[in-house]
Image: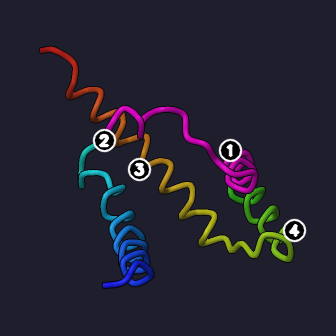
Amino acid sequence: MNALRLFVLTAIVATLSAPVAAAPAVGAATMADCSAPTRSLVERRIHEEAARGMPALIGFVNRTKPFYQLTVVDAVASIDRERERRTACMRASANDLPD
């Protein structure tokens, strides 16, 4: 096998194995998951508008749809993901407490 083929093969294997190696254990909430998440500007604005209520969130989505290509379903899904992450962190920290 010449050097070019070896290089290409190594690059392909490294590319394909990277997502598998970086995947966290299923169902395990780590302390890194529970730290303050880094959210994008859009995600921060979605959560700010959701705190004001559903009409404010719908208005925000409708106003910014040409810019962010966001739907109400996407916004609510983002809020649900954050809520699930927080719930998993609370459960993990409650399980770590001594009896």
Neighbours of disc 4 within 10 Å: few (<14), some (14-19), many (20+) = few
Asked if the residue under mark 3 is in contact with the one under mark 2, i.e. CB atoms within 8 Å, the reply is no
Q: CA distance from mark 1 to mark 4?
A: 17 Å
Which badge, 4 or 3, comes first in the chain's sequence? 4
| Residue 9 on image: x %, y % | 36, 79
Residue type at mark 4? Arg
The image quadrant where one finds the N terminus is bottom left
Which badge, 4 or 2, comes first in the chain's sequence? 2
| Residue on which disc 2 sits | 29
Which badge, 1 or 2, comes first in the chain's sequence? 2
Quadrant in the rendering for residue 72: bottom right
Q: Which mark is residue 51?
A: 1
Residues rendered magenta in the picture: 29-53
Asked if the residue under mark 3 is in contact with the one under mark 1, i.e. CB atoms within 8 Å, the reply is no
Asked if the residue under mark 4 is in contact with the one under mark 1, i.e. CB atoms within 8 Å, the reply is no
| Residue on which disc 3 sits | 84
Neighbours of disc 2 within 10 Å: few (<14), some (14-19), many (20+) = some
| Residue 89 on image: x %, y % | 36, 36
> Does 19 sit above or below residue 97?
below
Please tell me which residue lies in front, 21 or 40: 21
Which badge, 2 or 3, comes first in the chain's sequence? 2
| Residue on which disc 4 sits | 63
Q: CA distance from mark 2 to mark 3?
A: 11 Å
Mark 1 or mark 4, which is nearer to you?
4
